[in-house]
Amino acid sequence: MAVLTPELRAEAERIKARYPAGRERSAIMPLLYLVQSVEGRVTQDGLREVASLLGITTAEVEAVAGFYTMIRLRPTGRYVVSVCTNLACALRGARGVLEAARRTAGVPTDGELSEDGLFTVHEEECLAACDAAPVVAVNFANYDRMTEATVSELIEALRRGEEPPPARGPFPGDFRLVSRLLAGVPESVGAGAPEATATAEEPLR
Amino acid sequence: MSEPVRILTGRWREPDTVWIDRYLETGGYEGLRRALAMSPQEVIEVVKASGLRGRGGAGFPTGVKWSFVPQDTGKPTYLVVNFDESEPGTFNNRELVERDPHQFLEGAIIAAYAVQSHTAFIYCRGEFLWPGRILERVVAEAYDRGFLGRDILGSGYDLEVVIHRGAGAYICGEETALLSSLEGYRGQPRLRPPFPAVEGLYASPTLINNVETLSNVPHILVNGPEWFRGFGPEKSPGTKLFSVSGKVERPGNYEAPMGTPARVVIEEMAGGVLGGKRLKAWTPGGSSTPFLTAEHLDVGLDFESIQAAGSLLGTGAIMVCDETDCMVEVTRRLLQFYAHESCGKCTPCREGTWWVVRVLGRIEAGAGRPEDLPLLDDQCTNMLFRGFCALVDGAVSPMSSSLAYFRDEYEAHVREHRCPVTGRGPGLVAEQGAREEAPAATTVPSWADLAEELG
Ligand SMILES: Cc1cc2nc3c(=O)[nH]c(=O)nc-3n(C[C@H](O)[C@H](O)[C@H](O)COP(=O)(O)O)c2cc1C
Ligand code: SF4
Ligand code: FES
């Protein structure tokens, strides 16, 4: 079954054209993100479609997709909650933040996906934001200096359909929309150029 | 209190310097103008004379690297900007892009001109959603104003820039793995030589530089190599952005001349150890560089001095642990990172990291045995320099150094079946360990199975 609409197939061709002629295979990652933006993950159908776009086998695409953690081959929530537990965050209480996130989201002890399918909560490696430890990212937008209480509030707010403002930049939207941004085609979802950044409001050192 | 030096962070104090108008008003793209008025060879000579060394971890002289890119191969030449920043504790590339993105873009354009590349890729870490969005805008701005595209500033030089997002794999920061990834394959390292300068992306000459390295370049073009050499020691000139995190009062990126004593950065700039506690251990350059201790606080933060003290400057990422932190736990958590991120290509790395996590976990859980310490020593020896790339050497760093400096702490865990620092016994740790993530493609027994298996 075709995953991409004719419009998105045209988008896929533009993505391929970013790379030198004959080097279209380089587009595999943005194409996987594009498929993920439709499926909310990448299924066998999606892998097949990327394979046909690139003229390589589905097995080859799967081998690549399986290597990268941001390409989700398993069922995935609307919000991917990544809790950094690497050293700088661990030293400032990430373990408790992770526990609270899993509890509030309702993730079973042996899994990642919440019972209502809304959240994927997982342990993340260093997010390169250790100054704001412990860090939690929701669909790759960072929330700084989290505690057990604030991460629970964050998840509750998302469940109510709110869009809590991240530390920098606007709220990125659900996992499908974010995958579209990662494919590098923000216009296709009406996301314009980013505006004035919240970075400048941070305390300056 | 020493006077702060602001070169790379010069625009950070002003809000709104992110976009191109403010960048131009504050002297932006002057370095590029100067570069385009010179021959590519002259630009390389200026950067060589500055003594700038790569900030991505290895410290290779930047101008020398540029001069290695051959000009007569008949193939296109590529510039690849390494913005995959994933070394634990490191966050200066991200802030450089978030606060002053045109600075490094200008440096990238100068680098591309110097090696006569007409296509540049910015490999942006996948998780950097917002920094990636900023890049999209600044690249578009640069095209609009004639700093990218055809006939840049009327010089006849053309350059296209493509932003390429990664998808979550630490190993893709390693330059040859990055190239595999950019070509659309699994991010696994390749054999060197041939070095990327000669045979890199699409088997063509390729220059790979880090974001902080490139951010220095416009300043060198504007102010000259002698000015640059006015900061820091002779062999490590310039300033460095130190990412300070963990148990300090004010975590953050701090710019200081190379060679600044660690004490100044940790105690003055970052406000000292959190809550006035005693410093126990710190990394000078991310988790892949051996721990140092309170004894080393007066060592200068530059490539040579840190190496003489038994560690590496790496990315300049200083993670601080205090007297209340258990070094076995700290080390186990870092090794878990390497086990997770090992690309799986070579056995000492793939299996070694996996086993070390188990042995460290056993000691941490109070189930360690006296022979575990020599076993860990042995594992270090069998991993160090036995992998295809430096990831496995990075994994050994925290382990061998914590074993060297905190051996008594490991021994106390084994002897007392509990942590001498936190007082935690087997129960607590086992509960925590049961949920640790498994290394890719391996079925990991639960902590309980493991305890049984290990006796
Ligand atoms: C496991 C591993 C991970 C690395 N990750 C990064 C990284 O995230 N960013 C980076 O600039 N360099 C990284 N490097 C170093 C690069 O291989 C390369 O040396 C560097 O990008 C060269 O740029 P420079 O000369 O400007 O420092 C890594 C190296 C290894 C072995
Ligand atoms: S040392 Fe580790 S990360 Fe590097 S190539 Fe070997 S398995 Fe992969
Ligand atoms: S350790 Fe959590 S962001 Fe770096």
Image (cartoon, coloured by chain):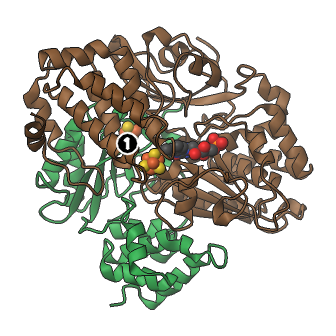
Residue B259 shown left or right of residue B144 in the figure: left
Q: Whole-percent x and y of residue B104?
A: 67, 47
* Residue B397 image position (x, y, % from top left): 43, 29
Percent across and percent down for residue B124 are 54, 55
> Chain A rendered in what hue?
green
Image height of B77 relative to A40, above or below: above
- Residue at image position (15%, 29%) is B365
Ligand 2 within 8 angstroms of badge 1 C-beta = no
Depth check: B53 or B137 in front?
B53
Q: Amino acid at mark 1?
A: Tyr
> Residue B453 occupies which quadrant of the picture?
top left
Q: Can you say whether A175 is above or below A150 in the image? A: below
Task: Answer left or right for A96 relative to B174.
Answer: left
Residue B71 appears in view: yes
Relative to A165, is B389 on the left or the right? right
Give the residue at mark 1: B338
Q: Colour of chain B?
A: brown
Chain for numbered disc 1: B
Task: Say which quadrant the N terminus of chain B sits in.
Answer: top right
- Identify the residue at image location x=42%, y=72%: A32
Viewer-nearest residue: A155 or B219: B219
Task: State the quadrant of the C terminus of chain B.
Answer: top left
Q: Position of residue B433 (x, y in %)?
A: 17, 38
